[in-house]
Image: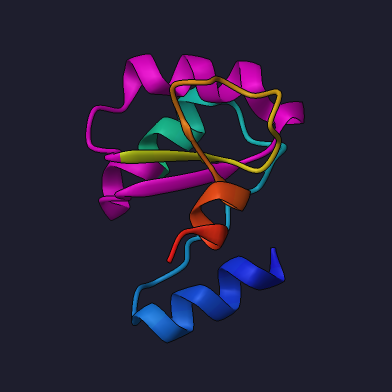
Amino acid sequence: MLDAFFAAGKLGVVLVPLNTRLTVPELEYILSDCGVRAVVYDAVHGTTVAELKHRVGTVERWVALDPTSDPADDHWEALVAAP
């Protein structure tokens, strides 16, 4: 998560930390309300993210921290390694 905080500062974007104890409808509201364009998640929250993908259409990029996550999503390590 520290990488994401520092990357956000360097990119000049606002990081919106989400409480992992919130329900899908609560997360959906937050994501829709603040206009999130990317979500970084880990495999532990894969089922929640899968449901959010169907509910929130404004997210442009889903970034998985774990290689075992959805293969259609971007993977954090690949993004960091890219030139």
The answer to whether 19 is drawn above or below residue 23 in the figure is below
Residue 62 placed where, x, y %? 44, 37
Residue 4 placed where, x, y %? 58, 67
The answer to whether 1 is drawn above or below residue 69 in the figure is below
User: Is 66 inside the magenta-drawn segment?
Assistant: no
Quadrant for the N terminus, please: bottom right
Residue 24 placed where, x, y %? 53, 24
Q: 22 or 42: nearer the eye?
A: 42
Residue extent of the magenta highlight: 31-60
Residue under the image location 47 percent in, 59 percent down = 82
Residue under the image location 53 percent in, 20 percent down = 71
Residue under the image location 30 percent in, 38 percent down = 59
Q: Image check: 7 left or right of 77?
A: left
- Image colouring: rainbow
Quadrant for the C terminus, please: bottom left
User: Is 37 inside the magenta-drawn segment?
Assistant: yes
